[in-house]
Image: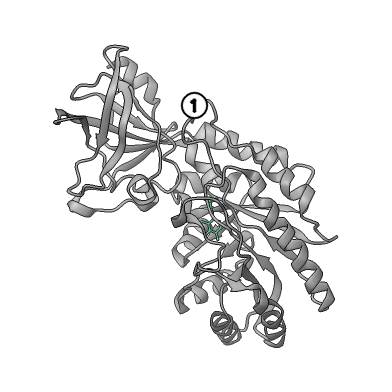
């Protein structure tokens, strides 16, 4: 078999299943834990179906994602819906589907959900997304829990907001929601979040408010530097932080919304070398993949492991690895030590399973790269044949 047209995404479904099973295993004793997969990290149908088969719920941030999650077999009552700008149509669709919970980010949104639920003769479960003003110590473009961010309501507004929600007949208050940021590699960062939840639980109890569920969002990071050595994040340490620091009340459920940590390592962006060019001071490898296929480097200065899968020699040298798009930001790596490379070599950009394919665009009138998986062919075997 020949290699498909490059660039393309290649998903290792076996690794995805192993990742999902590890989460199941390390939370086996925690009957109150409910793990939702954050669909925005990767909405590929095969990935969603694999997540659904393992019994996970979904965290969606648009009506389109709810539709995809339901189509993949995730039960609607295991779907939560977040987002600062839910449209009337999206709210309507979510109500019709009977999703588990709306994570409400403002009072105007609460009133709209209430009105639409009443019009449909339904009652919407709602949680308030609280902005805990906690620094996630991550890249500024992926931090979400600081006062300066647009997400959620503030702590001083919380009790008043819940009291107002309790007066509305189309909504039922069912808990608190948080999400402090993404690519958080030090799990200790989640401790202040646990403490914040504990304080708010006490505050709610003082005000005679019962919250059946607490949702701590996602954000667990992965090892972009060493994807092969660490294909799985330390889920054990992550869940332990919450188990030991967040005091769940009897009968309460604790929800998680993991995106990147579930899918990032199962994806590879496979690309072909178009040209190797000598600059004044640098050598450039020009790939047929660009930021239209993987935006993370241009957008967040992200690091991705890059490998020449078909080197002729073991000798290495420094290169800048760039894409073909007419923007100076279309650079995947600078001064990266790689095997000596020639035109036609096949490259792998690792850890491309999260925020890769979902962020692709047709800028420069480029075709979208196709997704394949281990169920379609064995990439290593094809490369060996060539
Ligand atoms: C993006 C997002 C997540 C998932 O974040 P990861 O860092 O990929 O785990 C979870 N919850 C909400 C509300 C989000 O917006």
* Residue lying farthest to the front in this orientation: 281
- Which one is in front, 242 or 13? 242
Q: Quadrant of the N terminus?
A: top left
Residue at x-position 26% and y-position 32%: 320
Q: Tell me where residue 172 appears, x and y as whole percent.
A: 69, 77
Residue at x-position 20% and y-position 31%: 284
Give the structural element (helix, strand or loop) at label 1. loop
Report the image quarter containing ligand 1. Answer: bottom right
Question: What is the quadrant of residue 256 in the picture?
Answer: bottom right
Mark 1: give few (<14), some (14-19) or many (20+) Cα within 10 Å: few
Q: Tell me where residue 104 appears, x and y as whole percent.
A: 59, 73
- Colour scheme used in the picture? one colour
Q: Tell me where residue 273 appears, x and y as whole percent.
A: 22, 29
In the rendered view, does 8 fall on the left or right side of 273?
right
In this orientation, does residue 251 appear? Answer: yes
In the rendered view, does 171 fall on the left or right side of 278?
right
- Which one is in front, 90 or 154? 154
Question: What is the quadrant of residue 166 in the picture?
Answer: bottom right
- Total label count? 1
Q: Using the image, determine if residue 111 lies above or below residue 37.
A: below
Residue at x-position 67% and y-position 77%: 156
- Which one is in front, 176 or 368? 176
* Residue on which disc 1 sits: 228
Q: Tell me where residue 200 appears, x and y as whole percent.
A: 75, 68
Q: Using the image, determine if residue 232 lies above or below residue 175.
A: above
In this orientation, does residue 2 appear? Answer: no
In the rendered view, does 250 fall on the left or right side of 2?
right
Q: Using the image, determine if residue 372 lies above or below residue 155.
A: above
Residue at x-position 46% and y-position 44%: 46
- Which one is in front, 270 or 223? 223
């Amino acid at each position: 078999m020949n290699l498909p047209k490059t660039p393309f995404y290649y998903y290792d479904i076996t690794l995805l299943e192993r990742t999902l099973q590890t989460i199941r295993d390390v939370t086996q004793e925690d009957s109150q834990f409910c793990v939702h997969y954050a669909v925005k990290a990767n909405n590929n149908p095969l990935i969603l179906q694999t997540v659904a088969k393992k019994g996970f719920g979904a965290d969606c941030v648009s009506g389109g994602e709810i539709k995809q999650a339901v189509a993949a077999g995730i039960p609607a009552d295991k779907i939560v819906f977040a987002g600062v700008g839910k449209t009337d149509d999206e709210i309507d669709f979510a109500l019709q589907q009977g999703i588990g919970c709306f994570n409400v980010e403002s009072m105007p949104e609460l009133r709209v959900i209430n009105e639409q639920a009443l019009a449909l003769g339904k009652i919407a479960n709602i949680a308030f997304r609280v902005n805990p003003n906690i620094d996630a110590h991550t890249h500024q473009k992926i931090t979400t829990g600081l006062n300066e961010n647009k997400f959620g309501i503030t702590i001083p507004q919380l009790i008043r907001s819940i009291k107002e929600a309790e007066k509305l007949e189309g909504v039922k208050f069912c808990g608190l929601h948080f999400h402090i940021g993404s690519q958080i590699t030090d799990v200790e960062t989640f401790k202040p979040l646990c403490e914040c939840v504990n304080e708010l639980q006490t505050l709610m109890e003082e005000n005679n408010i019962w919250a059946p569920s607490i949702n701590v969002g996602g954000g667990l990071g992965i090892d972009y530097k060493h994807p092969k050595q660490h294909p799985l994040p330390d889920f054990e340490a992550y869940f332990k932080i919450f188990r030991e620091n967040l005091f769940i009340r009897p009968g309460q459920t604790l929800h998680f919304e993991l995106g990147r940590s579930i899918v990032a390592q199962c994806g590879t962006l496979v690309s072909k070398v178009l040209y190797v060019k000598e600059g004044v001071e640098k050598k450039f490898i020009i790939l047929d993949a660009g930021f239209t296929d993987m935006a993370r480097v241009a957008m967040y200065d992200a690091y991705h492991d890059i490998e020449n899968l078909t080197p002729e020699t073991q000798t290495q040298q420094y290169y800048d690895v760039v894409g073909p798009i007419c923007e100076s930001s279309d650079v995947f790596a600078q001064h990266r030590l790689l095997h000596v490379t020639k035109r036609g070599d096949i490259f792998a950009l690792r850890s491309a399973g999260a925020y890769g394919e979902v962020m692709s665009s047709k800028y420069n009138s480029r075709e979208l790269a196709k997704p394949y998986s281990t169920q379609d062919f064995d990439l290593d075997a094809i490369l060996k044949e060539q």
